[in-house]
Amino acid sequence: MITTLRISSRDMVVLKVRRAGSGAELPAFLFQALPTEGLALLATLPAGAAAASIPAGRGYPILRTPEAVSGGGVIVYARKPNRRYEADSVLFEGKTFDLGDFVDVARRRLEETEGMPAPVSGRYVRFHPSRGEWDGILRDDGYAAFGGTGAEPDPGAASGIELRIPVWRGNRPGARESLPVFSRVEVRDAAAGGAWIGFDSWRRARASRARLPETMVPRFERWVERLAAEAGVRSWHFRPGMFFGDRVEWWGECSRRRTAHEGIDFAEAESGSGLRQIPEGLPVRPLAEGEKIAFLDDFLGTTVVVRHADSVRENGEVFHTLLSHLEVSEARPGLVGEGAVIGRVGRSKGAGAPAHLHLAGAWIPRTLGPGMITIDDIHPGFAPIVLVDFNPLVRRHPLCRAD
């Protein structure tokens, strides 16, 4: 079974079709033009991956109306109830094919014209993806649709990581020097002296680095209990969109997030008479003693960054916690105790998300000093910073309930 082919979140933002907003009606269909050589992407669409995308910025534009492509095809994306766009069919040579059927057509055409594609030994395309590109590759299980004609690099902020993809070529005489294909990336691993490792190996190593320090586990448990006691609630309630790594928003229309969720949202609680929102103005305290090193503007308020100098790795990474969407009366760096108030849950501003408390954890290298950290660095596609997965702790805490 082939994977789901969908339009990436980044391209949806560029096309202004991520959400309805202001009563605007989203188009029922979008169209992506593929030149002749681009059909090789559909011929190599991976099986088993949850989803994949063909970035518009690599030379395959996404349009609101179909435009004929000489010798190529047009992918038709249909809007789904979850407001995502997934490939439904392909227009090719005056006919309409289901996506699955056309993959077979594209494979036969590729074999007839170029032959069976295979990686060329010792030849690679190396590139530094933007944070948005790397986040998309992470979501696509390590697959990248590399190729395109006249494409400009994504001008977005750098991910801080280097990737490579083998050059692929058909085995027929006269085949092109390289084919645009879906291929899994390899990652240059700084921890292994700059060696290239496979995506699965990189992902396992990253997951190991994303763990909370053991000393922080009991502190997190106490912090959740204190937060509930001060809010006057019996337990915290979590639903899809509130967890680390979630791809949808938990409020409003549950639109797709631009990036995977960087932390945990405390927004709803059981009060004994049903669910209620977290109280605005609720005092917020750090998970543990540390040093307030930065105050960052976020889309609902202020993020306070606390460095925990007693949690340091041999490679120089220091553990930090970030508490976001706060009202802060005094943005002054300095040491802070576990029980000190560093801010209060901000008031709902009537736009975007309702008032809530966002907690994130991050291993940040010493090379990123306090004045160098920005809110955009707390991003799943920014490789130097390793975001921490709080989900296991939330799911087993007696005061946390999950849908």
Image: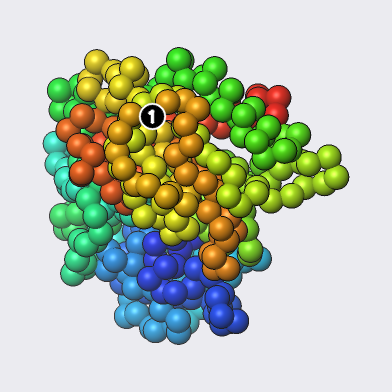
Q: Residue 144, image x and y in percent?
A: 33, 50
Q: Quadrant of the C terminus?
A: top right
Residue 351 figure quarter: bottom right
37 w.r.t. 175: above or below: below
Can the viewer see residue 251?
yes
Around disc 1, counting alpha carbons within 10 Å, would you say few (fewer than 14), some (14 to 19), or many (20 or more)? some
Instruction: Looking at the picture, tell me which residue is in the foreground, 55 or 12.
Output: 12
Corner quadrant of residue 213: top left
Residue 369 sits in quarter: top left
Estimate the x, y position of residue 243 in percent, counting from the top left.
57, 41
User: In this orientation, does residue 167 appear?
Assistant: no
Q: Which residue is mark 1?
A: 336
Q: Position of residue 53 (x, y in %)?
A: 42, 57
Q: Secondary structure at mark 1?
A: strand
Query: Number of callouts in the render?
Result: 1
Residue 159, compared with residue 226, is above or below; it is: below
Q: In the current view of this chain or complex, which residue is farthest to the front?
A: 330
Q: Residue at x 61, y 34 (%)?
A: 227
Query: Residue 261: image x %, image y %?
Result: 48, 46
> What residue appears at the point 27 percent right and 63 percent down from the top-left corner?
58
Give 111 or 249, whichever is nearer the viewer.
249
Q: Please tell me which residue is depicted at 27% across the width and 25% down the height of the picture.
A: 317
Residue 395, placed above or below residue 16: above
